[in-house]
């Protein structure tokens, strides 16, 4: 067991700004940040609030800013970080309490771009909509998004303009446009072809660096820009 100092940004309704609070814990070498937060909540301060669910890097619930970088708490090893380990809520979003932020604006933007398969042609009567292995492979690196918000929260363009649809939304747009079965390209491109859409992106690459699944939202946005410029609206 080793001792660690965890500095958590605390915030509750009525506070004007988050304030740091230090906790000292004893932890096993294998512990993650989520393990540390659970230890604090269960044994030191039950009022500490944060989201978590699967503990396997799949649900995206425990996304937060750790030592200045967006990560999933369940995947970040405590022993790899310098002390004090500073844990804050995702940036650029309204804080509800402690490490919990309001994700609703991100979900609303996602709904706006129709994040589902749009197929106007009737399916074959005797089988599902087929896709070749080559076409299926084009979706790799795009479909794996877990909606954690790490990318959008790390984006300076989003910090400066909350109307920006954000890299998470753009990644989802490209995931469906790249799908050979989808027929909604023109209507999605019309939605993102303005100043709150792809043209707000300044290719800073923060989103790509922040993604816990090693996806590349910047590349997806570049593909969307090229598609628009090539006249595929």
Image (cartoon, rainbow, N blue to C red):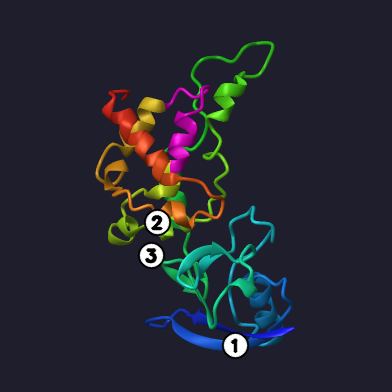
In the rendering, at what x and y percent does residue 96 appear?
48, 71
Q: Quadrant of the C terminus?
A: top left
**First along the sequence among labels 3 and 2:** 3
Q: Is residue 179 magenta?
A: yes
Q: Is residue 223 above or below residue 231?
A: below
Q: Secondary structure at mark 2?
A: helix
**First along the sequence among labels 2 and 1:** 1
The one of 187 and 166 positioned closer to us in this rendering:
166
Res. 92 mark? 3
Residue at 68% over, 15% down: 127
Q: Secondary structure at mark 3?
A: loop
Q: Is residue 105 visible?
A: no
Q: Quadrant of the N terminus?
A: bottom right
Task: Name the residue at the left extreme.
Answer: 195
Task: Name the residue at the top extreme.
Answer: 125
Q: On the image, numbered disc 2 is attached to which residue?
A: 206
**Proximity of marks 3 and 2: CB atoms separated by less than 8 Å:** no
In the rendering, at what x and y percent does residue 114 appear?
45, 36
In the rendering, at what x and y percent does residue 137 appear?
57, 29
Mark 1: give few (<14), some (14-19) or many (20+) Cα within 10 Å: some
Q: Count the marks: how many?
A: 3
Q: CA distance from mark 3 to mark 2?
A: 13 Å
Q: CA distance from mark 1 to mark 3?
A: 25 Å
Q: On the image, numbered disc 1 is attached to which residue?
A: 23
Q: Nearer the viewer, mark 1 or mark 3?
A: 1
Mark 3: give few (<14), some (14-19) or many (20+) Cα within 10 Å: some
In the rendering, at what x and y percent does residue 147 appear?
53, 51
Q: Is residue 204 above or below residue 50?
A: above
């Amino acid at each position: 067991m080793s001792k660690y100092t965890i500095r958590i940004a605390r915030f509750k309704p009525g506070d004007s700004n988050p304030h740091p609070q230090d906790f000292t814990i004893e932890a096993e070498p294998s512990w993650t940040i989520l393990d540390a937060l659970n230890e604090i909540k269960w044994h030191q301060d039950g009022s500490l609030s944060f989201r978590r669910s699967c503990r396997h890097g799949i649900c995206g619930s425990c996304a937060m800013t750790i030592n200045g970088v967006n990560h999933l708490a369940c995947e970040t090893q405590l022993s790899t970080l310098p002390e004090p380990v500073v844990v804050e809520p995702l940036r650029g979003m309204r804080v509800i309490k402690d490490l919990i932020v309001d994700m609703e604006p991100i979900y609303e933007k996602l709904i706006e771009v129709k994040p589902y398969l749009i197929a106007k042609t009737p399916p074959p009567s005797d089988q599902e909509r087929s896709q070749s292995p080559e076409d299926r492979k084009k979706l790799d690196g795009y479909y794996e998004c877990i909606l954690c918000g790490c990318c959008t929260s790390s984006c300076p363009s989003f910090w400066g303009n909350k109307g920006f649809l954000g890299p998470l939304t753009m990644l989802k747009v490209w995931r469906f446009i790249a799908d050979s079965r989808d027929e909604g390209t023109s209507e999605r491109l019309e939605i993102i072809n303005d100043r709150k859409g792809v043209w707000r992106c300044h290719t800073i690459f923060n989103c790509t660096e922040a993604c816990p699944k090693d996806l590349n939202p910047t590349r997806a946005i570049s593909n969307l820009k090229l598609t628009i410029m090539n006249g595929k609206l």
